[in-house]
């Protein structure tokens, strides 16, 4: 099976812009989670989607949003970018009833200038 | 917020030696998982141990879990240069999300 894929791999934006990141889960996986990784805060949970519904959300401002499509692919959007949004954004997919064992993509490195 | 605290933050050993990393957490968990990350890339799932298990092995990896002390350890035996990476513990306390520790940066010297 192909692994989790994320596009783009690298992105440079300026403050105030918005950005959309994409994630394709492992075939058959219906759960997709997003995490933000920064040197200061480490890995932090953003949100999780299952069958197009957001089941859980982390403590991030409303500028961070996401969605999931019927084919389980997911996108996350960050509006009005701030310098502090520079991070590695990781997507993970999970099979149903798998003890929450998550498989991660390579990440999207976002740099906000 | 981080649930897990990992110790040490950094570890440097010679190739062939064993490496031990520890993780402590705060709340009751369903399971605990260990992941490896190579230099800013995605995380690779290493091993999952459920709350009713005490020890688990996978190749050169050995994980222990002590729920009474809310702690876990990851042992990598006979280390290799390719084991150089950051290692994270992640706890599953329900709600379909993982809470990660800050990680241990392991360096294997040839």
Image (cartoon, rainbow, N blue to C red):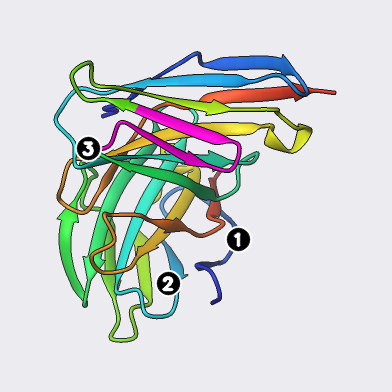
Residue toward you, B39 or B51? B51
Q: Secondary structure at mark 2?
A: loop
Q: Is residue B58 magenta?
A: yes
Q: Chain of mark 1?
A: A
Location of the N terminus of chain A (image quadrant): bottom right
Mark 1 / mark 2, whichever is N-terminal: 1
Q: Read off the residue under disc 3.
A: B51
Spatial separation of the CA atoms under disc 1 and disc 2: 15 Å
Q: Chain of mark 2?
A: A
Location of the C terminus of chain A (image quadrant): top right
Spatial separation of the CA atoms under disc 1 and disc 3: 35 Å
Image vertical order of residue A94 relative to residue A72, above or below: above
Q: Residue furthest right?
A: B110
Do circles 3 and 2 both sit on a common chain?
no
Q: Read off the residue under disc 1.
A: A9
Q: Residues within 10 Å of mark 2 (few under 14, many from 20)?
A: many
Query: Is residue A80 at least partly visible in the picture?
Result: no
Image vertical order of residue B55 relative to residue B30, above or below: above
Q: Read off the residue under disc 2.
A: A25
Magenta residues span B53-64
Q: Are marks 1 and 3 in contact (CB under 8 Å)?
A: no
The residue positioned 24% from the left and 44% from the top of the image is A60
The residue positioned 51% from the left and 16% from the top of the image is B9
| Quarter of image, res B80 | top right
In the visual, does B27 lie left or right of A83? left
Instruction: Label the magenta part by its dominant secondary structure.
Output: strand
Query: Is residue A39 at least partly visible in the picture?
Result: yes
Tell us which disc is closer to us: 1 or 2: 2
């Amino acid at each position: 099976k192909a692994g989790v894929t994320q596009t783009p791999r690298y992105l440079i934006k300026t403050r105030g812009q918005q950005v959309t990141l994409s994630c394709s889960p492992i075939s058959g996986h219906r759960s997709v989670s997003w995490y933000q990784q920064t040197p200061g805060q480490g890995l932090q949970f953003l949100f999780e989607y299952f069958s197009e519904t957001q089941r859980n959300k982390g403590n991030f401002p409303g500028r961070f949003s996401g969605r999931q499509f019927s084919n389980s692919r997911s996108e996350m959007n960050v509006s009005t970018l701030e310098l502090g949004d520079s991070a590695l954004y990781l997507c993970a997919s999970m099979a149903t009833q798998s003890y929450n064992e998550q498989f991660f993509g390579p990440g999207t490195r976002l740099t906000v200038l | 917020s981080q649930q897990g605290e990992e110790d040490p933050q950094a570890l440097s050993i010679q190739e062939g030696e064993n490496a031990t990393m520890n993780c402590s957490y705060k709340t009751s968990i369903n399971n605990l998982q260990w992941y490896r990350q190579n230099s800013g890339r995605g995380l690779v799932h290493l091993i999952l141990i459920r709350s009713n298990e005490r020890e688990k092995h996978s190749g050169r990896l050995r994980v222990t879990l002590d729920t009474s002390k809310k702690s876990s350890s990851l042992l990598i035996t006979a280390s290799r240069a390719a084991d150089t990476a950051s290692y994270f513990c992640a706890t599953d306390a329900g709600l379909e999300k993982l809470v990660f520790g800050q990680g241990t940066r392991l360096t294997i010297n040839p």
